[in-house]
Amino acid sequence: MNLLETIIHAQGGGLVRQLAETLGVDEHLVQRIIGQVVPTLSRGIQRNAATETGFTSLADTLAKGNHQRYLEQPWQLAEPAAQLEGNAILGHVFGSKDVSRNVAGAAAKETGIDTGIIKKLLPLLAPIVMGALSSRASSKGALSGGNSSTSQGTIASFLDFDNDGSAIDDVLNLVRRFF
């Protein structure tokens, strides 16, 4: 199961229901937004993790961030701390608010969903994505201080949306679509 599927199916769809309830929108809208922005978040994370320093920072964040709680207890997304944490993650992944705004604008253009809704959802999706990555990395033992290249491979395989064994083509397709 890739990252997108993990998020959509978390808690038997309870995560999507919680996000929809938090935003006051239909679950199908949330799923469409997730389908547009999670690949972009993944690309940003993968770009940051492409260097040894970036990967070490990511692995440390995944190991210590307790982001899995958002997958296991989606109701915590309604807490103000989730949005603050999400904004911090977005800042790290994208580097600036302008990039986050561009991501929201591109997703709005693709889905026809109001940019304001997408801007509210982005900071909630960021810790969810980190939680999904953390959960996958932990289950594969990638965060237990093992081989760095093995850990990078585990995370990269999770970011491989078309399951072809390489996340590179997925990244290039996302770049073409969003930028």
Image (cartoon, rainbow, N blue to C red):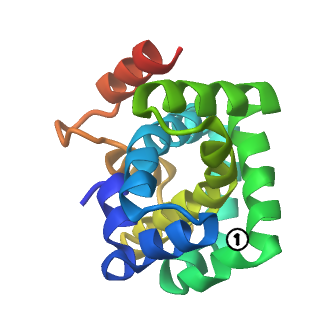
Name the residue rendered at 58%, 38% in the picture: 114
Q: Quadrant of the N terminus?
A: bottom left
- As drawn, is 75 to the left or to the right of 141? right
User: What secondary structure is found at the residue carrying circle 1?
Assistant: loop
Whether residue 2 is visible to the viewer of this picture, yes or no, is: yes
Whether residue 143 is visible to the viewer of this picture, yes or no, is: no
Residue 123's place in the image compared with 26, above or below, is above
Density class for disc 1 (Cα within 10 Å; few <14, some 14-19, many ≥20) is some
Residue extending farthest to the left is: 164
Counting from the top left corner in percent of width and height, residue 17 is at: 44, 74
For this rendering, which residue is in front, 78 or 51?
A: 78
Q: Amino acid at mark 1?
A: Gly
Q: Quadrant of residue 8?
A: bottom left
- As drawn, is 28 to the left or to the right of 77? left
Counting from the top left corner in percent of width and height, residue 161 is at: 28, 41
Name the residue rendered at 44%, 62% in the picture: 26
Counting from the top left corner in percent of width and height, residue 124 is at: 64, 60
Residue 136's place in the image compared with 98, above or below, is below
Please name the residue that numbered disc 1 is placed on. Answer: 65
Name the residue rendered at 49%, 20% in the picture: 178
Q: How many marks?
A: 1
Counting from the top left corner in percent of width and height, residue 175 is at: 46, 18
Name the residue rendered at 78%, 25% in the picture: 98
For this rendering, which residue is in front, 5 or 143?
A: 5
For this rendering, which residue is in front, 123 or 120?
A: 120
Residue 149's place in the image compared with 127, above or below, is above
